[in-house]
């Protein structure tokens, strides 16, 4: 069963963001990780790249599927999780502990468009 | 009504009358027509196709023999991207093994190791020839491989959609690039030539204008000239553009490789590795790239893995890039490779081996230079550009080119390709000294 | 099959100094390739004698399965018999040695063959002209869409950039549209597998002037004939779009119905499906594109010459062999074979849409889902019994899709044998599910680790050696 972790915000394209001050850690939800199966590759942006809310910033690949990563917020990439380069399976082990990029938010009002854990769980149940 | 009577009288249909009756009963229809009851009558085809009547094998042979006799057999001194190289007798016989010939794409790895195994070998051989890290399982031909290379550069380049193309590319390739670019919204800009080679100054100026995703050059270029690409890759990389080289596969046995020139993507046609000319196809395109770009590469890729008995095995891999999964987000719509022709090239490289591919290239080089010297000696020919060439060269003829070309044909020679008011001659290891001397005699008349 | 003895790569059989070729001596004199042109390191190709090479590839072929090996009911691929006469015709030296740049008056036979094949295909499809430039089905799709795009552009109708496809379409359709710079919109299917006309009307209403084309196969991906095709074509034509026919499923239409008569304007044909040219392990095929009168001027240049000419020769030999008498029996016999299997198995396999099918049909796995045996397991178990697996997990409309297409060439005995084995597997799923789930057992290799291959790609011998 997929976990729906409290305290995070979720998008309809199954990314989560954990907000800490002006920064946000973006990853894929446990639900998304289950749906993808064994992750074999994570395509990540470079540090200093700009990301835009609703636009793609990378992709996650499993053996039989590939899914674009859609940024839930706009901002600048300040860090990428390099551990995923060699161990993409970390996303299967713990999707919430293994964020993909850290972003400096440019417009925190965008967070209002995202769902909390409860709303996201309901969203997934109806999917 | 469909005539069920004659079905049992044809060699490709095994159904007897009894079979038909039993099967129709099971399918719940009274006659074969009943199988199409759902089709609106207004669009049913009820007539007879206007086609010839069925033919026996002997009659089919006769039709093809007659057609074949209308083709003039010429001794080939033409190139222009298609070369008359030698085909070892082993190859067609192995290609006719019907376990290769009549199989589909190797989706079921357990019963397709033959195909998967040779594709892995093919990929290994193409990376050896090109000096690149990675190869895909092959593409349709050289021109479409170039188009895929162009699209790959744009896809990798994020928001840059300009590709610079040397005027030294074969116009046949350029035409295909133009087609794909038009629909993709890619802007193609030509890098002009200077004295028969790509102008580096112009390249640098065009790169400086920005938003260039890739730069494509051909080696040897359309005039047969072996260009010096020193500094090209560096100039591209400074502007974050990918450097794409299109080369004749067989020449890479001896020529400095795309890898050595610093290319990010190497494309071209493998036809020169012994594949018959056959009026334009089937050939095989190759595409290789650096390790960094592997997930941007279109087409199939075979990788090594293990089976559940701990044996080494091969399998289609990185499929998540491909059209059947990515649908409209795939960077290419390519589904198949040119598998059987990849097998052709693989067996060719196995037989010819490390030494044979070099020897064939050296013979082609020697024959072409001998022909060039002999033509020059007639006093009627001169090289348009005095630049180093490989096995193809471009000359001006002091006289009526059309009349000369026809004289060649009348004597049984395909005397090069007429192009830009000159003649482009190609020589391969198949051309003997005697054939060359005879060609020169006609040229000297 | 003998993977253990002959599992080596050709590189692993190489020994320095061996050779498998012979070339004439160089008697042109001393023409040395200048060092400045040359590569620094030699290409590390294998060095083998001729017998070693012949034996290696012969043994590899023994690890393969082709139509000549056994029944190959691979849905949507039309794995029909590839007649041997076709190969003999394509191998003739009078064609093999033709350079594509030869002047037309020296290639009259080859050009005549192109014209004869074009006429035959026009007759069989009800269209007016064909281009032979496309090298494969996907290449044909792209060519056809480019033709349509060029047509709209020529009329200054530049906003037409949307292509409607049914939600059951093969992934290649949207990918081809994207490469052509077009956008896909999906039209829904009804419970009976057919295009939802109401949804199509809604889309046409909404997008009318931006619709470039509607792209579909008929019969569709489920092997069902789209009975409302005349209305669909009318809707699309009225809003200014063109109808594109994906010829992937043309085989059952031979003798029954022509795409041109259904209302299609542009189509491609997979010569390697309907016209019996061998699949070759994934190519070369050919995807000629046909159009209605007037559209031929919009054909794009997608390859330099006549595409895969050798494939065209085979297709023409096939058409001559069948003649007008037998071409029209191809469709009915293929359809009969498919329905015979369907009716013989639907009590043990789940048939989501129980109706007369065309050349193929789709089961949604075993009827009894309690055993835990999946479509993948059934497919792998079939390999043990000497059959190629059907197409699995496509179309995406069902979770456990198992798509079966027998073709017209298979005898009742072959079909009965297959049916018996499919029933036996259904039985094994109940009595000995582990045997099925761990299949195949008799093939040269067992199930492979896809994750290992994708996570850490090793795709060349050089990389393989570096691993060791």
Image (spheres, rainbow, N blue to C red):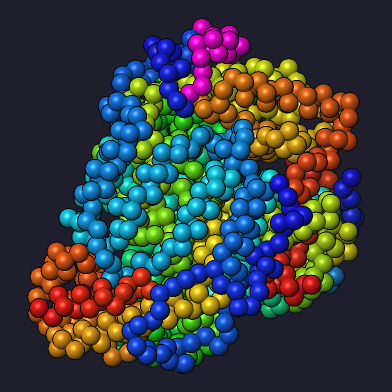
Residue C65, percent from left and from top: 63, 43
- In the rendered image of this protein, does residue A54 appear above or below residue C366? below
Residue C23 falls in image quadrant: bottom left
Q: Which contiguous range is marked in magenta?
A: B13-30
Relative placement, left or right, of B65 versus C283 is: left
At x 56%, y 33%, the residue is C221
Q: In the image, is residue A42 above or below residue C39? A: above
How far across and down, in percent of the image, does residue B300 sit? 60, 57
Give the residue drawn at x 30%, y 58%: C98
Q: Which quarter of the figure has residue B53?
A: top left
Which SS type dominates the magenta stretch? helix
* Location of residue B331 with respect to B361 vertically, above or below: above
Q: Is residue C224 left or right of residue B195?
A: right
Q: Is residue B173 visible?
A: yes
Q: Position of residue B284 (x, y in %)?
A: 47, 60
Q: Residue at x 78, y 28 (%)?
A: C425
Question: Looking at the rendering, in which quadrant would you find the N terminus of chain B?
Answer: top left
- Magenta stretch: includes residue C73: no
Name the quarter where the C terminus of chain B is drawn.
bottom left
Instruction: Looking at this view, name the residue that lies furthest to the top.
Output: B30
Check residue B19 for magenta coloring.
yes
**As rendered, which of B265 and C240 lies closer to the eye?**
B265
């Amino acid at each position: 069963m997929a976990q729906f972790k409290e305290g995070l915000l979720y998008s309809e394209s199954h990314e989560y963001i954990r907000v800490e001050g002006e920064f946000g850690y973006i990853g894929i939800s446990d639900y998304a990780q289950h749906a993808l199966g064994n992750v074999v590759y994570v395509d990540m942006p470079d540090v200093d790249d700009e990301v835009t809310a609703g636009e793609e910033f990378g992709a996650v690949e499993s053996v039989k599927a590939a899914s674009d990563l859609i940024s839930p917020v706009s901002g600048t990439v300040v860090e990428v999780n390099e551990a995923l380069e060699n161990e993409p399976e970390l996303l299967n082990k713990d999707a919430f502990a293994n964020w993909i990029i850290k972003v400096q938010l440019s417009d925190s009002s965008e967070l209002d468009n995202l769902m909390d854990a409860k709303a996201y769980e309901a969203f997934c149940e109806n999917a | 009504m469909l005539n069920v009577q004659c079905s049992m009288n044809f060699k490709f249909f095994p159904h007897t009358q009894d079979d038909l009756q039993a099967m129709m009963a099971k399918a719940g229809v009274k006659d074969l027509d009943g199988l199409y009851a759902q089709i609106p009558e207004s669009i049913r085809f009820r007539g007879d196709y206007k086609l010839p009547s069925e033919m026996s094998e002997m009659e089919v042979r006769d039709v093809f023999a007659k057609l074949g006799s209308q083709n003039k057999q010429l001794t080939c001194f033409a190139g222009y991207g298609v070369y008359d190289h030698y085909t070892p007798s082993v190859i067609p016989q192995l290609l006719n093994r019907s376990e290769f010939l009549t199989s589909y794409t190797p989706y079921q790895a357990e019963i397709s190791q033959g195909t998967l195994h040779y594709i892995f070998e093919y990929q290994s051989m193409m990376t050896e020839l090109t000096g690149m890290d990675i190869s895909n399982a092959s593409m349709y031909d050289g021109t479409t491989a170039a188009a895929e290379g162009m699209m790959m550069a744009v896809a990798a380049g994020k928001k840059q959609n300009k590709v610079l193309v040397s005027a030294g590319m074969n116009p046949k390739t350029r035409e295909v690039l133009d087609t794909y670019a038009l629909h993709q919204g890619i802007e193609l800009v030509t890098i002009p030539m200077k004295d028969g080679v790509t102008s580096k100054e112009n390249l640098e100026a065009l790169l400086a204008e920005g938003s260039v995703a890739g730069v494509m050059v051909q080696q040897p270029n359309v005039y047969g000239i072996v260009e010096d690409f020193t500094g090209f890759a560096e100039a591209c990389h400074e502007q974050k553009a990918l450097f794409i080289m299109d080369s004749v596969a067989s020449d890479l046995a001896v020529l400095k490789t795309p890898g050595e020139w610093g290319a990010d993507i190497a494309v071209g046609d493998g036809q020169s590795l012994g594949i018959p000319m056959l009026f334009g196809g089937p050939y095989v395109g190759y595409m290789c790239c650096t390790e960094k770009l592997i997930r941007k590469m279109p087409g199939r890729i075979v990788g090594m893995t293990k089976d559940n008995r701990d044996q080494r095995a091969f399998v289609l891999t990185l499929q998540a890039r491909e059209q059947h999964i990515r649908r409209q987000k795939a960077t290419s719509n390519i589904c198949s490779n040119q598998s059987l022709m990849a097998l052709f090239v693989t067996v060719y490289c196995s037989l010819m081996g490390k030494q044979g591919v070099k020897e064939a290239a050296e013979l082609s080089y020697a024959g072409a230079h001998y022909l060039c010297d002999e033509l020059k000696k007639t006093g009627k020919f001169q090289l348009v550009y005095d630049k180093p060439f490989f096995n193809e060269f471009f000359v001006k003829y002091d006289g009526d080119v059309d009349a000369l070309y026809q004289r060649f044909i009348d004597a049984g020679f395909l005397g090069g390709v007429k192009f830009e008011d000159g003649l482009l001659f190609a020589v391969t290891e198949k051309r003997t000294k005697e054939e060359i001397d005879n060609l020169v005699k006609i040229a000297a008349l | 099959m003998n993977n253990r003895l002959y599992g080596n790569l050709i590189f692993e059989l190489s020994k320095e100094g061996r050779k498998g070729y012979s070339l004439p001596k160089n008697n042109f004199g001393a023409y040395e390739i200048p060092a400045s042109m040359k590569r620094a390191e030699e290409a590390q190709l294998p060095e083998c004698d001729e017998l070693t090479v012949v034996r290696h590839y012969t043994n590899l072929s023994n690890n393969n399965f082709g139509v000549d090996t056994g029944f190959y009911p691979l849905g949507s691929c039309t794995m029909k018999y590839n007649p041997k006469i076709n190969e003999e015709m394509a191998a003739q030296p009078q064609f093999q040695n033709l350079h594509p740049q030869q002047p037309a008056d020296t290639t009259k036979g080859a050009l005549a063959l192109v014209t004869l094949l074009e006429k035959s295909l026009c007759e069989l499809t009800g269209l007016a002209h064909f281009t032979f430039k496309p090298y494969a089905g996907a290449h044909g799709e792209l060519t056809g869409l480019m033709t349509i795009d060029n047509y709209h552009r020529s009329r200054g109708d530049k906003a037409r950039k949307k292509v409607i496809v049914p939600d059951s379409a093969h992934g290649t359709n949207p990918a081809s549209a994207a490469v052509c710079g077009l956008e896909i919109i999906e039209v829904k299917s009804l419970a009976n597998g057919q295009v939802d006309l109401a949804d199509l009307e809604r889309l046409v209403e909404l997008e009318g002037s931006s619709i470039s084309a509607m792209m579909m196969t008929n019969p569709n991906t489920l092997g069902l004939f789209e009975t409302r095709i005349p209305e669909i074509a009318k809707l699309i034509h009225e809003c200014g779009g063109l109808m594109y026919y994906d010829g992937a499923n043309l085989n059952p239409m031979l003798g029954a119905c022509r795409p041109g008569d259904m209302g299609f304007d542009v189509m491609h044909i997979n010569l390697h499906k309907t016209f019996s040219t061998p699949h070759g392990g994934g190519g070369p095929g050919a995807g000629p594109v046909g159009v209605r009168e007037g559209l031929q001027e919009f054909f794009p240049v997608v390859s330099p010459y006549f595409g895969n000419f050798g494939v065209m020769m085979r297709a023409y030999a096939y058409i001559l062999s069948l003649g007008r008498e037998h071409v029209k029996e191809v469709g009915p016999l293929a359809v009969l074979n498919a329905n015979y299997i369907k009716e013989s198995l639907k009590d043990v396999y789940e048939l989501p849409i129980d109706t007369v099918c065309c050349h193929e049909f789709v089961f949604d796995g075993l009827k009894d889902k309690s055993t835990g045996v999946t479509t993948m397991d059934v497919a792998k178990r079939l390999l043990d019994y000497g059959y190629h697996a059907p197409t699995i997990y496509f179309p995406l409309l069902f979770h456990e899709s198992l798509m079966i297409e027998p073709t017209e060439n298979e005898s009742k005995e072959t079909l009965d044998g297959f049916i018996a084995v499919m029933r036996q597997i259904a039985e094994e799923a109940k009595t000995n599910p582990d045997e099925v789930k761990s299949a195949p057992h008799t093939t040269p290799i067992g199930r492979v680790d896809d994750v290992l291959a994708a996570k850490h790609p090793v795709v060349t011998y050089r990389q393989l050696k570096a691993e060791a």
